[in-house]
Image (cartoon, rainbow, N blue to C red):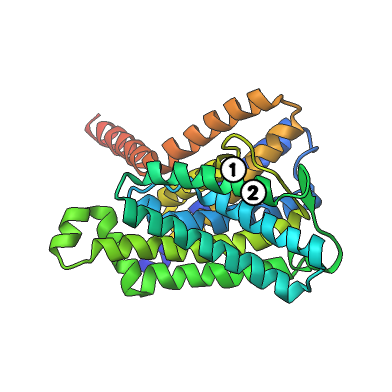
Amino acid sequence: MNTQSTKLKNAITVILLPVLVYLLFFILSRGKFGKSATIIMNFKQTLVPTLISYAMCCNVLCNRMDLSAGAVVMLASMFGAKMVYLYQISLPAFALLVVGSGIVLGVISGIAYMVLRVPAIVTALGVCMIYETLSNLTSISWVTAISGETTLLGHFPYCVIIFAVMAVLFYIIFNYTKFGYNVRACASSQQIAKNGGVNTKKTAFMCYVVSAVFLGVAALLRISIQGSIDTPMYMSSTNIIFNCLLGIYVGLALEQYCNLTIGIFVGNFVLNMLTSGLMSLGLSSSLQDTASGVFLLIIMIYTYNNQRILDYIQNKKEKKLLENKIA
């Protein structure tokens, strides 16, 4: 009974976060924000960032920052779009080409990290610049677009089905495989994990391999949903991953209440709602960034400290009851 009560309480806590954000912007915008079409759009826009968050999660937990993830998504998308433009390839060929390209590029990032033996962020920056250069060479114009049947996978319900399959895959990999166990061990302490028999080098490489699979699918969904891809310039591909990183950290904060797979999705959904909500208030882009940072900070502070707050309130009540009894 206590277990069921705890699960229900945790579920309510997780659901309460997006609900509160929704109500806040609904009130502040006087009903401009929060229409059903807006929520559906936010949900759809959450799919790709969540997949990128899943891709980066294992490396982030092991203190490796893969800044090349955004460049992998952009280059794979760009290459697939160009093949459609030049050769009018079919949808199955397009899907295989984009996902396959993402996997190959992601694995190359992992090989570069293993061979060069320099900090992951240094390797990632170098790979990112190379991939952005290749994206520029691959692009047809400033914006490379696809249309018609090729974008079918970006429509409902296909995009949701693809996302659901990948979410289940991440859940299984992270929670029920030896690799997932090794990642969690390395996240606690690389040295202790190594002393405990974990092959940390193999685990590191497998993090990039798993990441590559999710980045390939993310690239496919991104180009299919948007219908176009911008040519990256001056490390602009890193902009893709910053919100995804925040989604991971929100997910980690929510992990005490739900599985990390769900927590990361909720984190990305809340971040998308923040962006849409601030736009509905008519704020400039600079003020939107500031407000997003403040809101996110408040959310993180509350999520990490809410039990402490509840304990404080409970202690105050007990102290007051004790004082009343004594009086």
Image quadrant occupied by the N terminus: bottom left
Q: Is residue 220 left or right of residue 111?
A: right
Return the residue found at the far front: 137
At a point 44% along the width and 73% down the height, the residue shown is 172
Q: How many angstroms separate mark 2 from mark 1 (CA)?
A: 10 Å
Up-down: is 195 above or below 309?
Answer: below
SS assignment at label 2: helix
Query: Residue 318 appears at what percent x and percent y?
Result: 29, 39
- Which residue bears the numbered disc 1? 237
Can residue 267 be seen by looking at this rendering? Answer: no
Q: Are marks 2 and 1 in contact (CB under 8 Å)?
A: yes
Can residue 284 be seen by looking at this rendering? Answer: yes
Query: Amino acid under label 2?
Result: Ser
Q: Is residue 133 left or right of residue 179?
A: right
Return the residue found at the far right: 148
- Which residue bears the numbered disc 2? 135
At a point 75% along the width and 52% down the height, the residue shown is 41
User: Residue 164 shows which numbered tag?
Assistant: none
Up-down: is 308 above or below 109?
Answer: above
Q: Is residue 270 left or right of residue 309?
A: right
At a point 78% along the width and 55% down the height, the residue shown is 227
Q: Nearer the viewer, mark 2 or mark 1?
A: 2
Query: Residue 301 appears at what percent x and percent y?
Result: 42, 36
Tell me the quarter of the picture where residue 6 sits. Answer: bottom left
Query: Residue 153 appears at what percent x and percent y?
Result: 74, 68
**Neighbourhood count class around disc 2 (C-alpha, 10 Å): few under 14, some 14–19, many 20 upward:** many
